[in-house]
Amino acid sequence: MLKGKKILLGVSGSIAAYKSAALVRLLVKSGASVKVLMTHDAHEFVTPLTLATLSKNPVLTQFKSSESGEWNNHVELALWADYMLMAPATANTIAKMANGLCDNLLLATYLSARCEVFVAPAMDLDMYAHPATQHNLTQLKEHGVILLPVAEGELASGLTGKGRMIEPEEIVERLSQHTLSQSTLKGKKVLVTAGPTYENIDPVRFIGNHSSGKMGFAIAETFARMGAQVTLVTGPTELQTEHEGIKRIDVTSAQEMFDKTVQVFEKCHIAVMSAAVADYTPEKVAVSKIKKSGDELVLKLKKTKDILSYLGSRKKAKQLLVGFALETDHEEENAMKKLHAKNLDFIVLNSLKTKGAGFKHPTNQITILHRNGQKTAYPLKSKYEVAADIVNQLTSLMNG
Ligand code: CTP
């Protein structure tokens, strides 16, 4: 998948820099053209000569080459690349990237890059867990950088934990998967629902739920980054949509979400329904505020339309439809029943049992169940990584 791709590899001063040699080798073997930029400190861990030999290109560290006196133009380098890959990325380089510092050639090139940037962090567990580093990583994500996960295990310090750079094979695999998803999803019309719905009781009160919309927004953004044309139909949320590839439609009630979603579904290739839609709504909405009277108040509710079921009954052969299931008992059995009843291609089972998963959390833990019984259980991850897993599963389905 990386054939013909131009990749700028940024190597900073971590012990994991010794893996850069294998990384360059693998990237070149996959058909990519590779140019390497290093920080001064990275020279202590791997020689520029090794990386220049493997990449078949000069390795650059300074704005002005000491031998030839030539100016290394960071803007030209940045514009040359299809992807920029920071691997390993130290806590220091990540902090500087997050804050726009550019006191070396690598960082100046990063700031000039228009291409997609991937970051593979590498550091000791406490440095990784430090709120400052986590804040910087979040900042990078908000700037559109694609964060690769870190591995868990024995670290150079002798301590064991999270912070190690993932292996070169996994980095290349993730880049290839990204490229595949991009070529599959470019120009595809995708519909995503997100957030809660509010069902009015009277002019000042409603029935709602705790959904934040984070999962659906992460899915919409992941699709948009892959070049898809996304329509995001969302219930009330404070979240913002950053990507220009997302057309956002704000709705309030289950009925409004139904109306907008059905309109868009007709022409879309993929629909992912992650909204927490109210199953019941007040039978009558009081015109004026209901005044307090008596010890009890009984509200009569009627069923809302099940949007997912309706779309499932309308689905054409080439359309892909994905739903979510939130279950507390007989999780997989109930999710499979929903998958068949609603005619889905796969269903994403959310766990409420795992600490840190579900409503309001930035993380989620899912299991994806397919019609043919195929099942993938994922560990607890950030909602952006979960979104990438869902998108990858869809890409695989589309590619047969
Ligand atoms: N859903 C929908 N319209 C509804 C209710 C749910 O489109 N009126 C969708 C959700 O977006 C989700 C899936 O259906 O993708 C599953 O929702 P869930 O609440 O888990 O299941 P229900 O089918 O509503 O069943 P139950 O609440 O009994 O578990």
Image (cartoon, helix red, strand yellow):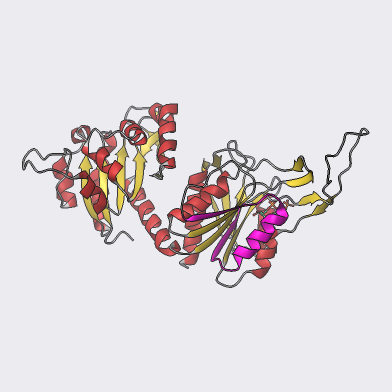
Above or below 198: residue 41:
above
Q: Total marks drawn? A: 0
Residue bounds of the magenta highlight: 245-274
Tell me if residue 356 is in the magenta stretch: no
Residue occupying image coordinates x 51% and y 60%: 394
Q: Where is residue 116? Give x, y as percent.
A: 35, 50
Furthest toward the bottom, the residue is 317
Q: Where is residue 331? Give x, y as percent.
A: 67, 49
Q: Where is residue 88? Give x, y as percent.
A: 30, 39
Location of residue 101 (image quadrant): top left
Tell me if residue 258 is in the magenta stretch: yes
Q: Where is residue 142? Give x, y as percent.
A: 44, 41
Residue occupying image coordinates x 24% and y 32%: 103
* Residue 245 relative to residue 342: left or right: left
Furthest toward the left, the residue is 68
Furthest toward the right, the residue is 294
* Residue 188 relative to residue 307: left or right: left
Location of residue 153 (image quadrant): top left
* Residue 237 relative to residue 102: left or right: right
Residue occupying image coordinates x 43% and y 29%: 129
Above or below 179: residue 195:
above
Above or below 70: residue 392:
below
Tell me the quarter of the image containing the N terminus: bottom left
Location of residue 297 (image quadrant): top right
